[in-house]
Image: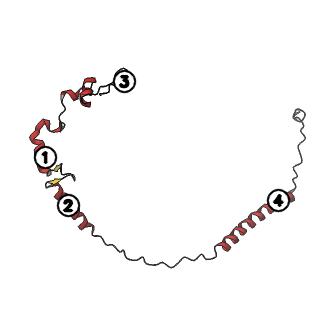
Amino acid sequence: MSAETRPHHDFPSPEVANRAVMATAAGLMTMMLAGVFLMAGIYAWQMPDRRLPAPQRLPDPQVRTDERLLRQQLEAAQTERLSGYHWENQQKTLIGVPIERAMELLVARGAAAYDPIIPQSNTTAQSPGAATAAAMQGQGSSVPSNGQAPERPQ
């Protein structure tokens, strides 16, 4: 009964042309090996000399530095600059003070030590209005407001 209920399918024959498959596989392998040998031949033709040159000793350096001496000289120059009075600019308007003296000056100022060096006046502390701007520009000039053209002195 099981034979009657099973549908009958017409499957293709399991026979495969083994010679054609083997010939195709052999042809592909032959082409791959030919490619490898061809590339090896081109490489050998283009790069015939593969020997490395004999190692040579590098020449001694022309400049010899004594790092310890250089560091000591640098530290001495920095210490001298920090421990003495000197001009900070070419115009000789700014004096460099020794670091110890600068710390003494800061301690002497107390709480005001970190205030601005140049004190701000009350008029410049506020935002400049028309009167302040006119005073800053000088006499005879005015500040335009509301899109009006400024007056020109004659």
Q: CA separation, marks 4 and 1?
A: 93 Å
Could you say where residue 54 lies in the image, as x and y percent from the top left?
50, 79
Q: Quadrant of the N terminus?
A: top right
Crowding around mark 3 (Cα neighbors within 10 Å: few <14, some 14 to 19, many 20+) is few
Amino acid beneath label 2: Ala
Q: Mark 4 — residue?
A: 24
Dot 3 or dot 4: first in sequence order is 4
Could you say where residue 37 lies in the image, as x and y percent from the top left?
72, 69
Amino acid beneath label 3: Ala
Q: Mark 3 — residue?
A: 149
What's the residue at 16%, 50% (across, down)? 95
Vertical arrangement, residue 48 with respect to residue 68, above or below: below
- Circles 3 and 4: CB distance less than 8 Å? no
Vertical arrangement, residue 1 with respect to residue 23, above or below: above
Dot 1 or dot 3: first in sequence order is 1
Could you say where residue 62 lies in the image, as x and y percent from the top left?
35, 75
Q: Quadrant of the C terminus?
A: top left
Q: CA separation, marks 3 and 4?
A: 95 Å
129 sits left or right of 120 in the view: right
Amino acid beneath label 4: Thr
Q: Quadrant of residue 83?
A: bottom left
Q: CA separation, marks 2 and 4?
A: 84 Å
The disc at residue 103 is 1
Helix or strand or loop: what does disc 4 sit on?
Answer: helix
Q: CA separation, marks 2 and 3?
A: 60 Å
The disc at residue 77 is 2
**Foreground residue among 11 and 117:** 117
Helix or strand or loop: what does disc 2 sit on?
Answer: helix
